[in-house]
Amino acid sequence: MYTTLKQIACAGTLVALASTASAQLGRQRGLVEPNVAADSTLLKLPYMNAAIVQAIKDARPILSVVTLDSILAGKSLSKP
């Protein structure tokens, strides 16, 4: 009986962890992941052109938004 209770407790913990992990991400409406986005997706974004898309692809993997910001700034895109 102890083993069965232990298994139920483990299963409950896994379900709780799985639901927490998916809840943290949430819906990413309107956001694009620059590490995996296709060229066509990136080109549809405002102010993007082929040179900027190529610079993003060349810098992959982009590990922080600060890095992405510096790539875009290097291509004359500013925050405003």
Image (cartoon, rainbow, N blue to C red):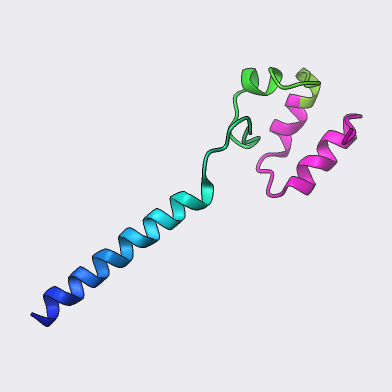
Asked if 39 appears above or below 31 in the picture, the reply is: above
Task: Locate residue 78, reporting x and y percent.
Answer: 90, 33
Side of 17 relative to 10 (left or right): right
Task: Locate residue 14, reporting x and y percent.
Answer: 32, 62
Side of 5 relative to 34 (left or right): left
| Rendering quarter of residue 62 | top right
Quadrant placement of the N terminus: bottom left
Task: Locate residue 22, reporting x and y percent.
Answer: 44, 49
Q: Residue at x 52, y 47 (%)?
A: 25
Asked if 18 appears above or below 12 in the picture, the reply is: above
Check residue 62 for magenta coloring. Answer: yes
Q: Residue at x 26, y 70 (%)?
A: 10
Task: Locate residue 40, reporting x and y percent.
Answer: 63, 17
Side of 79 relative to 55 (left or right): right
Quadrant placement of the C terminus: top right
> Which is nearer the eye, 26 or 62?
26
- The residue segment tinted magenta is 53-80
Check residue 71 for magenta coloring. Answer: yes
> Which is nearer the eye, 55 or 29?
29
Residue extending farthest to the left is 1
| Rendering quarter of residue 4 | bottom left
Give the prevailing secondary structure in the magenta stretch.
helix
> Which is nearer the eye, 60 or 76?
76
Q: Residue at x 63, y 32 (%)?
A: 32
| Rendering quarter of residue 77 | top right
Q: Residue at x 66, y 35 (%)?
A: 34
Q: Number of callouts in the render?
A: 0
